[in-house]
Image: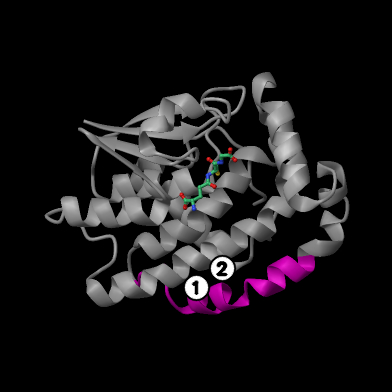
Amino acid sequence: MLKLFDLAGADSQRRFSPYCWRIRMALAHKGLDVETIAWRFGDKDVIAPSGQGKVPVLVHGEKWLHESWDIAQYLEDTFSDRPSLFGGPQGRALSKLYSNYGDVISGQVVRFVLVDILNHLHETDKAYFRESREQRFGATLEQVVADREQKLQGFRDSLHPLRMTLKTQPYFGGASPLYADYAIFGVFQWARCISPFQLLTQDDPIAQWRDRLLQAFNGLAASAPGYDLET
Ligand SMILES: N[C@@H](CCC(=O)N[C@@H](CS)C(=O)NCC(=O)O)C(=O)O
């Protein structure tokens, strides 16, 4: 009944979009079964009914949905008898901040993993990826990641608000995870699926939170092909 177009690499099991992972986790939270369809950058035609060219795209009956935040709203409203993704209207409003902040972190993380992404792409996607991203960054992919070791501490420091929160509660949602958690987690899961680069140290409360979410829903995220994390 539900189908998700999910970004994949050369190996169709390697699913690595931060935004698709948000929705994979949200669907699991709602206890909804979904057929995930490996999608590559060149497959714009198959998602054309959504009216745009990016994933996640969720198909529910006749409806074609896109934009991770809009899909989360749809799931919450359509499957309102299932566990809430937001914990009520106030939580929904607050979750928007986490979604936007996840986008910001995604913009930081891409500068560490850009070449690793390229290396995992299907041959048919590589030229498009290089050209579109080099245009976006105004530099070669290799130049963008060249100073990643030097940038790492600054990145870790920038996550301090998350760290402070997770020192005193297991999830942003409190005792159990909500969409706010998945919106940020998607970014770390993306990195784990595509790159051996260790973004976090294991003693970081953010890494421990990531580990809890990797194990959630019978290890949905942990069982996805990716790299081992430092322990
Ligand atoms: N704001 C969108 C972002 C979606 C997005 O950027 N998806 C990427 C994959 S991670 C994509 O499909 N890009 C297609 C392309 O670059 O051609 C969301 O939250 O869903």
Say whether marks 1 and 2 touch (CB < 8 Å): yes
Look at the numbered disc 1 and give the secondary structure of its residue. Answer: helix
The answer to whether residue 165 is seen in the rendering is yes
Q: Which label belongs to residue 166?
A: 1
Q: Residue 189 in the image: x percent, y percent?
A: 54, 48
Q: Which label belongs to residue 205?
A: 2
What residue is at 57 percent from the left and 78 percent from the top?
Answer: 161
Query: Looking at the picture, which amino acid does disc 2 mark?
Result: Pro
Query: Looking at the picture, which amino acid does disc 1 mark?
Result: Leu
Q: Residue 152 in the image: x percent, y percent?
A: 78, 62
Name which quarter of the figure residue 105 lies in. Answer: bottom right
Q: Quadrant of the N terminus?
A: top left
Instruction: Tell me: residue 44, above or below residue 221.
Output: above
Q: Which residues are magenta?
A: 153-174
The answer to whether residue 172 is seen in the rendering is no
Categorize mark 2 by other alpha carbons within 10 Å: few (<14), some (14-19), many (20+). many
Q: Nearer the viewer, residue 51 or 83?
A: 51
What residue is at 46 percent from the left and 63 percent from the top?
Answer: 99
Q: Nearer the viewer, residue 121 or 45?
A: 45
Look at the numbered disc 2 and give the secondary structure of its residue. Answer: helix
Q: Which label belongs to residue 130?
A: none
- Which residue is farthest front? 51
- Left or right, 65 with reference to 147: left
Instruction: Tell me: residue 199, above or below residue 98.
Output: above
Q: Residue 160 in the image: x percent, y percent?
A: 62, 76
